[in-house]
């Protein structure tokens, strides 16, 4: 009886060992492992412009910037400071900020010189931790009344600001 018991135990142990080896076999699955989808990145963007009050007296100031859909939008500046904030903009995105100066027809110089200082910037932070607090494009100039037209032309030529956000 002990002999039968030992034989049965041996056969049972052999079967269990074979089962273990087949259970641990390598997977032969030919299905490709799906790539993880990249996290969608967004950005918060701040546009800003500021100028001396003399510049508002001399010129009509138009701001053209890129909105969340990528379209250019135009606004008229009424005060010495202008800001626009965009939230959760899909990246990649090209942020444009352009300032357009048009001398007012009714403007007649009454002073010998005018403060035509101005500044502008584009800042952003992205959902994946990138940021650019930007460098202000700035001009601080006291302009004599005879040079106002020349300075407005120079401002128009240098007032475009572009940032690629990735």
Image (cartoon, rainbow, N blue to C red):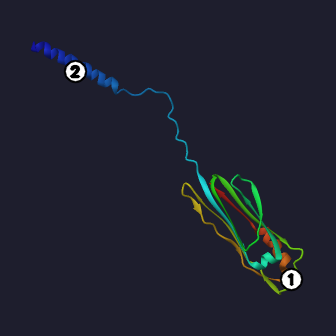
Looking at the picture, does residue 122 appear above or below residue 52? above
Sort mark 1 into few (<14), some (14-19) or many (20+) by Cα contacts within 10 Å: some
Q: Is residue 55 left or right of residue 37?
A: right
**Residue matched to label 2:** 13
Q: CA distance from mark 2 to mark 1?
A: 107 Å
User: Where's the N terminus, which quadrant?
Assistant: top left
Residue in the picture at 58% in, 51% down: 41
* Front residue of this view, candidates 112 and 104: 104
Residue drawn 73% across the image and 60% down it? 65
- In depth, the one of 44 and 4 nearer the eye is 44
Residue 162 falls in which quadrant of the image?
bottom right
Q: Tell me: residue 47, above or below residue 105.
A: above
Q: Which of the 4 image quarters holds residue 10?
A: top left
Give me the residue at 22% from left, 21% from top: 13
Relative to 36, residue 150 above or below: below
Quarter holding residue 23: top left
Which disc is residue 77 wearing? Answer: none
The x and y percentages for residue 3 are 11, 13
Label 1's element?
loop
- Give the left or right position of residue 123, taking residue 74 as reference: left
- Left or right of 121, for residue 127: left
User: Mark 2 or mark 1, which has the lower sequence index?
Assistant: 2
Q: Determine the secondary structure under disc 2.
A: helix
Q: Where's the C terminus, which quadrant?
A: bottom right
Determine the residue located farthest toward the right in the rendered image: 105
Q: Mark 2 or 1, which is nearer the eye?
A: 1
Q: Position of residue 82 (x, y in %)?
A: 71, 69
Does the residue at mark 2 contact the one at mark 1 (Cβ under 8 Å)? no
Residue that mark 1 sits on: 109
Residue sticking out furthest to the front: 78
Rendered location of residue 29, percent (x, y): 46, 27
x then y, percent, for residue 94: 69, 56
């Amino acid at each position: 009886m002990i002999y039968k018991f030992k034989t049965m135990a041996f056969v049972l142990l052999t079967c269990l060992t074979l089962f273990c080896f087949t259970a641990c076999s390598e997977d032969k699955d030919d299905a490709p492992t799906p790539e993880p989808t990249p996290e969608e990145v967004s950005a918060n963007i701040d546009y800003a412009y500021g100028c001396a009050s003399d510049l508002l007296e001399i010129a009509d100031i138009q701001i053209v910037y890129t909105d969340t859909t990528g379209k250019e939008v135009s606004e008229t500046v009424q005060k010495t400071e202008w800001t626009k904030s965009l939230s959760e903009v899909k990246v990649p995105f090209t942020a444009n900020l352009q300032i357009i100066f048009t001398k007012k027809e009714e403007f007649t110089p009454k002073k010998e010189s005018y403060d035509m200082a101005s500044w502008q910037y584009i800042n952003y932070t992205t959902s994946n931790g990138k940021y650019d607090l930007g460098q202000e494009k700035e001009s601080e100039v006291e302009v004599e009344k005879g040079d106002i037209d020349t300075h407005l032309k120079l401002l128009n030529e240098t007032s475009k600001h572009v940032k690629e956000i990735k």
